[in-house]
Image: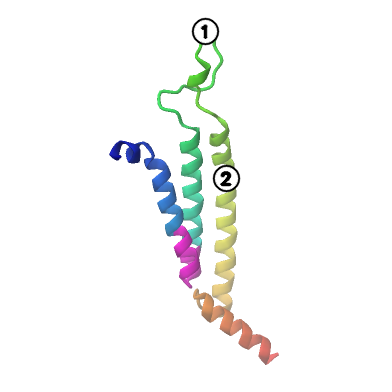
């Protein structure tokens, strides 16, 4: 049983990170904590994809005569992870800039306070 858990450790850590990020994203009213939760979820997916493409004792996929085809590491998850990292950094920058604008306007990072002030501002006009 312990051997099976150690063999699947990357998947278990990925599920744990995703769960922590999910809870952080949906339960905390602070916008910065929500962004951190989203980044944890992104990171867990990257870990999961990298673990899917890894093979113990595998080699880089360079074709040579007489090589064993079954022992090559799949390069597609690595490419997906690199693309995902670029997208995650871009969305994080966008969310942080929008959070900064909200803070300058409402002087709070609490989503409940921002929504209350925005609703109050709409009613005043």
Which type of secondary structure does the marked residue at label 1 adopt?
Answer: loop
Q: Which residue is mark 1?
A: 66
- Farthest residue toward the bottom? 124
**Residue at figure coordinates x 50%, y 33% from the top left:** 53
At 40% across and 46% down in the image, what residue appears?
12
Count of all numbered marks drawn on residues in the image: 2
> Residue 84, labelled with which disc?
2
Looking at the picture, does residue 16 appear above or below residue 111? above
In the image, the segment drawn in magenta is 21-34
Residue 97: percent from left, percent from top? 58, 63
14 vs 65: above or below: below
**Which residue does the image show at 40% across and 41% down from the upper left?**
10
6 inside magenta stretch: no
Residue at position x 62%, y 88% in the image = 120
Q: Main secondary structure of the magenta part?
A: helix
Earlier residue among tags 2 and 1: 1
């Amino acid at each position: 049983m312990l051997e099976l858990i150690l063999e699947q450790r990357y998947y278990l850590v990925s599920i744990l990170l995703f769960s922590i990020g999910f809870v952080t994203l949906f339960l905390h009213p602070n916008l910065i904590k929500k962004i951190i939760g989203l980044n944890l979820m992104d990171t867990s997916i990257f870990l999961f994809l990298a673990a899917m493409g890894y093979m113990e004792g595998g080699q880089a996929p360079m074709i040579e005569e007489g090589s064993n085809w079954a022992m090559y590491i799949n390069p597609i998850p690595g490419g997906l992870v690199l693309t995902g990292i670029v997208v995650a950094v871009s969305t994080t920058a966008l969310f942080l800039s929008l959070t900064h604008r909200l803070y300058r306007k409402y002087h709070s990072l609490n989503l409940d306070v921002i929504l209350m002030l925005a609703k109050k501002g709409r009613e005043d006009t």
